[in-house]
Amino acid sequence: MKDITLVREKNFLTMFSPYKIYIDDEFIDYLEPSEKNKTINVPDSSKKLKVKVNKFSSNIIVINEKESKISITSQIHNGLFILIFGCFFCSLTLKLLGILKNNYLGIALLTPMLILVYWQIFDKNNYLRISKR
């Protein structure tokens, strides 16, 4: 049996969602939001690990060691997440208060949201990033 330790990185985008753990395209277990580390035992014949959250999935990682430690995070890191929602809410607030008169500046402040929209619509299979530690 192989021991795999999954480490949940602190990420604002996926903070409240449980991760589904798949070994060789077979569901194994959940990694709940309250759990930061989880060790699972898998058979020696297992080759691939994938993690899913909601309808999004991660890259596939090959398991070939007896003991491995794997970190799970989102492609959109905390700084980018704060920037996206900061620009989004600031532009909407300024527009609603009548302070932002230039429509082009309002559109420019909303464009960082397109990064989040792109990852959620077009790149669902690389929404999460798993890597060996």
Image (tube, rainbow, N blue to C red):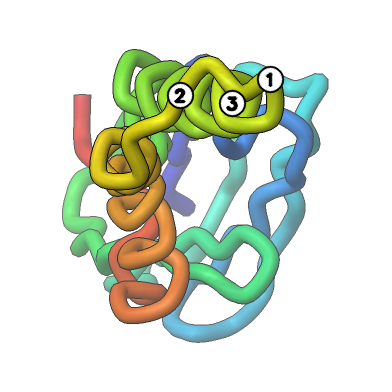
| Amino acid type for the residue under numbered disc 2 | Leu
Looking at the image, which is closer to me, 125 or 94? 94
Q: Which residue is mark 3?
A: 89
* Residue at the image position 49 percent from the left and 59 percent from the top: 51
Q: Nearer the viewer, mark 2 or mark 3?
A: 2
* Residue at the image position 59 percent from the left and 82 percent from the top: 26
Q: Which residue is mark 2?
A: 100
Residue 11 appears anywhere in the view: no
Where residue 94 sits, quadrant-wise, is top right
Does 78 sit left or right of 133 as displayed?
right
Where residue 33 sits, quadrant-wise, is top right
| Amino acid type for the residue under numbered disc 3 | Phe
Residue at the bottom extreme, as displayed: 25
In the image, residue 72 above or below residue 107: above
Q: Which residue is mark 1?
A: 97
Looking at the image, which is closer to me, 125 or 118? 118
Q: Are marks 1 and 2 in contact (CB under 8 Å)?
A: yes
Q: Position of residue 43 (x, y in %)?
A: 48, 65
Does 121 sit left or right of 53 as displayed?
left
Q: Position of residue 49 (x, y in %)?
A: 38, 64
The numbered mark, 2 or 3, whose residue comes first in the sequence reads 3
Q: Nearer the viewer, mark 3 or mark 1?
A: 1
Looking at the image, which is closer to me, 111 or 63? 111
In the image, residue 9 above or below residue 39: above
Tag 2 secondary structure: loop
The answer for how far apart the CA atoms under marks 1 and 2 are is 8 Å
The answer for how far apart the CA atoms under marks 3 and 1 are is 12 Å
Looking at the image, which is closer to me, 81 or 67? 81
Q: Position of residue 88 (x, y in %)?
A: 50, 33
Tag 1 secondary structure: loop
